[in-house]
Amino acid sequence: MDDGDERSRVIGRIIEVQRDLARALAHDRSSPLLDSNLTIRQLKVIMILAFHGSQSGQDLARSLGVGLATVTGIVDRLVNHRLVERHEDPADRRVRRVRLTAEGRALADRLIDAGNEHFRALLSYLDLDTLRTLETIMHRIRQAAARMCADRAREAAGKASSPAPSRAGR
């Protein structure tokens, strides 16, 4: 058995355990979603703004994979819910940007933090040595996530800057 095979098997077992934990904690994680009367696309906009800050309509359309008219409708409804607001782009006054309101930020925080109290209670069942080991592992996972995000950003920048393939001769 080579390292690649073993690595794949270990990752598979970790994913299985993570899935079991997610199921065990699902009732806590679902609550803010079930309490919300927002659509999935509206929730996606809330989370995009929470993670990336102010966005133009074009940015949101690209992130959601929809047209600008669709984004306008989604944002209009979120404005009516007082979860987002439109504002002028300081660099280009012709561009309207969208950002979370305080109420929108509070909703995003509730969604992001869903399940933390239940997870905290679960962690209290672990001994101190296990908690210290888990803390070290979680820091390593966070570092790996940062590297993965940086790699993906570089790949996306490379795709955006590379010229489109020629269609000549087709």
Image (spheres, helix red, strand yellow):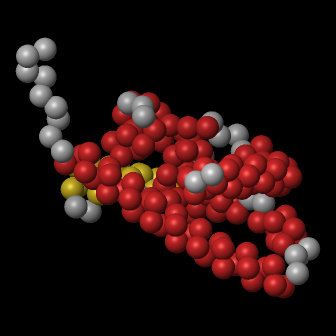
Q: Nearer the viewer, residue 48 or 10?
A: 10
- Residue 105 drawn above or below residue 15: below
Place of residue 70 in the rendered image (x, y in percent of width and height, measured from the top left): 44, 30
19 vs 99, left or right, is right
Place of residue 154 in the rendered image (x, y in percent of width and height, measured from the top left): 32, 57
Place of residue 62 in the rendered image (x, y in percent of width and height, measured from the top left): 37, 40
Outermost right residue: 125
- Residue 68 drawn above or below residue 148: above
Q: Nearer the viewer, residue 78 or 25?
A: 25
User: Within the image, what quadrant is residue 112 found in?
Assistant: bottom right
Q: Which residue is drawn at 79% across and 79% down?
A: 131
Q: Which residue is drawn at 73% across and 52% down?
A: 13
57 vs 132, left or right, is left
Outermost top residue: 170
User: Within the image, what quadrant is residue 42 found in?
Assistant: top right
Place of residue 122 in the rendered image (x, y in percent of width and height, measured from the top left): 87, 68
Q: Which of 159 and 40 is in front in this view?
A: 159
Outermost left residue: 168
Q: Is residue 26 visible?
A: no
User: What quarter of the picture does the C terminus occupy?
Assistant: top left
Q: Which residue is drawn at 15% across and 40% down?
A: 163
